[in-house]
Image (cartoon, helix red, strand yellow):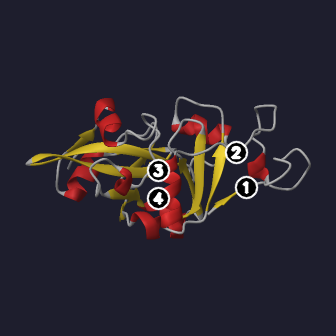
Amino acid sequence: MVKGCQGCRGTQGCGDPWAYVAGMGVATLLSMIPEPLKQYLDSKQANYRVLSHAPRPTAQETAAAAHVSGWRFAKTVLLRVRNGEPSFVLCLLPASEVIDLARLGSLLGREVKLATEPDFVGLFPDFEAGAAPPFGELARAPGIPVVADACLTAAGTLVFNGGTHQDLIEMSWKDFRRIANPQVIDYGLLQGISAPPPM
């Protein structure tokens, strides 16, 4: 069930900080997330909110534009996994971190590398490239596993892309875990910090 301001859209002091997008200078209507995502979340009886923001090039900048901590803003990254034939995994980690590909590959027991944009577009045609939500069941090849970074478990709520570069979804970690059933692994590195050399 989507939540949001039903009347003033933040201009009348209703107290709903999600009804007004700060920094844009104008009150905005809550955007419409893509219908396949809305149907999916509603079918799972998810409680969520939609937040709109001006498009930004990076997850950290998107988090800042939406006034969300980089630890609570979760970016979705599609990886190609080698195991005989190519397959994929969706990774979810804080905007303030990058994937330690070697560590994640070691923990999964398979080599991983970043997927290409054509991979992303082919698997998630209902969403803008790079803005797919972190639900493997929404892929053209359903059943892509989701791997969440362990530090996200400390977040009471997560904010992630809602299928477009303007829309975000806010959802509790508990609801996200129930719906996505992610494998939880510690594989993120703070941006700007290199992985330790192999022993």
- Counting from the top left corner in percent of width and height, residue 35 is at 51, 48
Residue furthest out toward the left: 84
Res. 136 image quadrant: bottom left
- The local crowd at label 2, few if under 14, some if 14 to 19, many if 20 or more residues have their Cα within 10 Å, is many
Residue that label 1 marks: 4
The amino acid type of the residue labelled 3 equals Pro
Residue that label 4 marks: 40
Residue that label 2 marks: 30
Q: Give the mark toward the camera: 2 or 3.
A: 3
- The local crowd at label 1, few if under 14, some if 14 to 19, many if 20 or more residues have their Cα within 10 Å, is some
Q: Secondary structure at mark 2?
A: loop
Distance from the alpha carbon under mark 2 to that under mark 3: 17 Å
Residue that label 3 marks: 36
Q: Give the mark toward the camera: 4 or 1.
A: 4
The amino acid type of the residue labelled 2 equals Leu
Mark 4 vs 3: CB contact within 8 A = yes
Mark 2 vs 1: CB contact within 8 A = yes
The amino acid type of the residue labelled 1 equals Gly
